[in-house]
């Protein structure tokens, strides 16, 4: 292996195959270096990479980057492969040519390829075939391996080289692999991964540390975003949910139509993502990649979209006098339309905004008048406030380990005041009522949202402080944590003792043991009798459901029975769904049964047929 660097770009050279000692040639030329063998060449200089011969380049696909649909639909495809002298024609058929010489700047290489590491390779051999025939043969032999191997992501370069040699199966050939690293991007990427991995969120001081690295190396915003999104996706607790979301979108993209149940499942996954602190941008990125330009058949546009389009077009693209009519009522209608579209997984509203943005751009260029953007920005500011409130309240409703500060509540309070100025009922009707009606919110989530709303009203009246609000919300979250601790400990002790929930003496003794365990771990909370009794009651409900009701639901596909129990029991749906899956597995039943049981529940939850 040979290692060196050119400015911030490090290179590693790996060689294997026949005549390694006699065919490996390179020369250093000032700050650059050139590798050559058997008519093949790869030169590295401060300007970038120059290549010619038989071979190509490859890198791991980053999450969220645009890639061919054929690669998107194949889960096993991990990597991007480009063969020298090859291109896709208009029918997306791969065409080989004899012109295999080319060059790439480092900036473009790490912009179009992977932001941190990219590879080149060439094959030195005695084969005198014309270049395009040789390239086609190499692709046929080793292309599948290079497209699908996980060795690139795992930095197992020695095994990668050996695998390429093995797949090529040319005993008389020599394989050269060149690994190029962007040291500055690597530092930023590793810093983000380290900071993000534990809590899956960043504190303000950690954001400042990342900004300092980006500023030091002048890493542009696009590259920062690419590395952040890719790292967030690779977190194991994010990946499985995001992959399931992607698979549903792929089914929709293939058919170019969406079923109501699919939209409901997408909505459920987004709700679960909030609960698991998975960034919504991962889902938004997939929406953009898989649903754009797919020609999804349109249906009659809902009224709220028609009204939104009319408001925006009148505000910006009619006579100048209409531009004065950016009034509160119009903005309130637009925000309610955005909310309706969001609730129904309808991308129509975002498409309208995109159309308006393009029209603004055309108007500004043709008239040299950029005031139009200021007017649009004044409305988009309200959309940003909507997103901030929706995100904040969703985290409060669904996240268990809540991290709240007076500053975050102060920001929430400020945004609410802006909406109150438009419509005094907006905050309660759009945010609070919808969250309380969500099927997957827990009893503790409802309690936090109610406490938050009541606390905000008290603060606005001057009857409470932000600090008191924070303490009240933390108190509810602590109660939830102890509830789950009691539930887990109680179930374990019941299994260990082979006792029953109905043996009062045993329950009293177990309650005392759990209280002592909580004290030993430093929890100041005293296990109140009503909290312990609540756990007992919920476990009895859980036992009754799994042992009596759920078997009937599965056998008879009685959706109404299941829904009635879940609506009235007060138990956590996500938790119960996990127990249902365990029940099916323990009884040798297919999980497909569970999906059929849920089908009735999903229909009507999450919006209409339109994407």
Image (cartoon, rainbow, N blue to C red):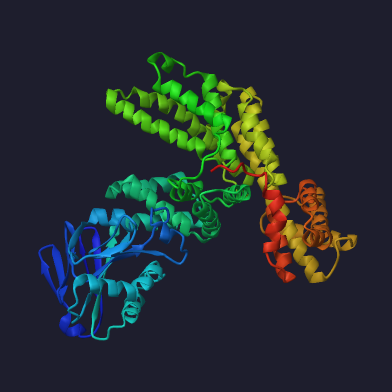
Q: In this view, does 494 lie above or below 378?
A: below
Q: In terms of depth relative to the viewer, which is nearer, 31 or 307?
A: 307
Name the quadrant containing residue 71: bottom left
Q: In terms of depth relative to the viewer, which is nearer, 7 or 419?
A: 419
Q: Does residue 554 appear in the picture of this structure? A: yes
**Relative to 479, 118 lies left or right:** left
Q: In this view, does 293 lie above or below 492?
A: above
**Relative to 35, 566 lies left or right:** right
Q: In which quarter of the image is the N terminus?
A: bottom left
Please, which residue is most extreme toward the top here? 321
In this rendering, the count of numbered labels is 0
Q: In terms of depth relative to the viewer, which is nearer, 306 or 571?
A: 306
Name the quadrant containing residue 98: bottom left
Residue 435 place in picture, x, y as percent: 65, 39
Q: Does residue 418 appear in the picture of this structure? A: no
Q: Is residue 391 above or below residue 247?
A: above
Please, which residue is most extreme toward the front here? 91
Residue 410 place in picture, x, y as percent: 54, 32
Residue drawn at point x = 24 percent, y = 66 percent: 11
Residue 572 place in picture, x, y as percent: 71, 51
Name the quadrant containing residue 303: top right
Residue drawn at point x = 38 percent, y = 60 percent: 61
Residue 479 place in picture, x, y as percent: 70, 48
Q: Is residue 306 above or below residue 519?
A: above
């Amino acid at each position: 292996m040979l290692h060196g660097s050119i400015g911030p770009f490090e290179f590693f050279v790996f060689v294997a195959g026949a005549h390694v000692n006699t065919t490996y040639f390179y020369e250093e030329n000032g700050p650059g270096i050139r590798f050559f063998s058997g008519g093949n060449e790869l030169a590295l200089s401060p300007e970038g990479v120059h290549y010619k011969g038989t071979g190509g380049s490859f890198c791991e696909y980053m999450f969220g980057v645009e890639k061919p649909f054929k690669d998107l639909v194949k889960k096993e495809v991990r990597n991007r492969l480009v063969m020298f002298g090859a291109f896709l024609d208009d029918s997306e058929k791969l065409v080989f040519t004899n012109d295999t010489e080319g060059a790439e700047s480092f900036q473009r290489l790490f912009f179009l390829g992977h932001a941190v590491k990219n590879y080149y390779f060439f094959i030195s051999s005695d084969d005198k075939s014309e270049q395009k025939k040789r390239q086609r043969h190499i692709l046929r032999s080793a292309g599948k391996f290079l497209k699908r191997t996980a060795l690139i992501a795992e930095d197992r370069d020695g095994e990668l080289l050996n695998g390429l040699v093995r797949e090529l199966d040319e005993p008389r050939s020599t394989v050269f692999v060149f690994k190029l690293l962007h040291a500055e991007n690597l530092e930023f990427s590793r810093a983000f991964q380290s900071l993000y991995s534990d809590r899956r969120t960043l504190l303000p001081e950690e954001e400042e540390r990342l900004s300092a690295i980006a500023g030091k190396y002048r890493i542009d915003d696009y590259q920062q975003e690419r590395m952040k999104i890719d790292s967030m996706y690779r977190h194991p607790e994010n990946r499985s949910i995001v992959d399931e979301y992607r698979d549903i979108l792929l089914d929709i993209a293939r058919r170019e139509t969406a079923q109501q149940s699919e939209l409901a499942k997408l909505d459920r996954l987004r709700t679960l993502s909030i609960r698991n602190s998975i960034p919504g941008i991962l889902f938004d990125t997939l929406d953009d990649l898989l649903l754009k330009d797919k020609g999804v058949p349109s249906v009659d546009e809902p009224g709220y979209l028609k009204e939104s389009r009319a408001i925006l077009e009148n505000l910006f693209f009619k006579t100048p006098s209409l531009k004065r009519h950016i009034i509160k009522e119009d903005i309130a209608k637009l925000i309610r339309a955005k909310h309706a579209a969001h609730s129904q997984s309808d991308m129509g509203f975002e498409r309208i905004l995109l159309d308006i943005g393009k029209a603004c751009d055309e108007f500004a260029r043709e008239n040299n008048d950029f005031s139009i953007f200021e007017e649009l920005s004044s409305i988009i500011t309200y959309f940003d406030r909507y997103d901030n409130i929706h995100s904040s309240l969703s985290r409060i409703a669904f996240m268990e380990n809540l991290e709240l500060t007076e500053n975050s509540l102060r920001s929430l309070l400020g945004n609410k005041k802006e909406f109150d100025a438009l419509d005094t009922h907006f905050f309660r009707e759009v945010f609070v009522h919808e969250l309380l009606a969500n099927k997957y919110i827990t009893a503790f989530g409802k309690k936090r949202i109610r406490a938050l709303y009541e606390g905000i009203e008290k603060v606005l009246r001057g009857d409470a402080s932000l600090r008191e609000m924070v303490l009240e919300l933390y108190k509810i979250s602590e109660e939830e944590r102890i509830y789950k601790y009691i539930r887990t400990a109680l179930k374990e002790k019941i299994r260990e003792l082979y006792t029953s929930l109905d043996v009062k003496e045993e329950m009293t003794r177990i309650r005392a043991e759990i209280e002592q365990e909580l004290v030993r771990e430093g929890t100041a909370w005293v296990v109140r009798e009503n909290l312990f009794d609540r756990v007992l009651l919920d476990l009895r409900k859980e036992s009754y459901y799994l042992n009596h009701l759920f078997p009937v639901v599965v056998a008879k596909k009685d959706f109404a029975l299941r829904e009635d129990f879940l609506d009235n029991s007060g138990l956590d749906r996500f938790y119960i769904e996990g127990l249902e899956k365990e029940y099916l597995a323990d009884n040798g039943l297919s999980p497909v049964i569970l999906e059929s049981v849920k089908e009735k529940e999903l229909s009507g939850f999450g919006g209409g047929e339109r994407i």
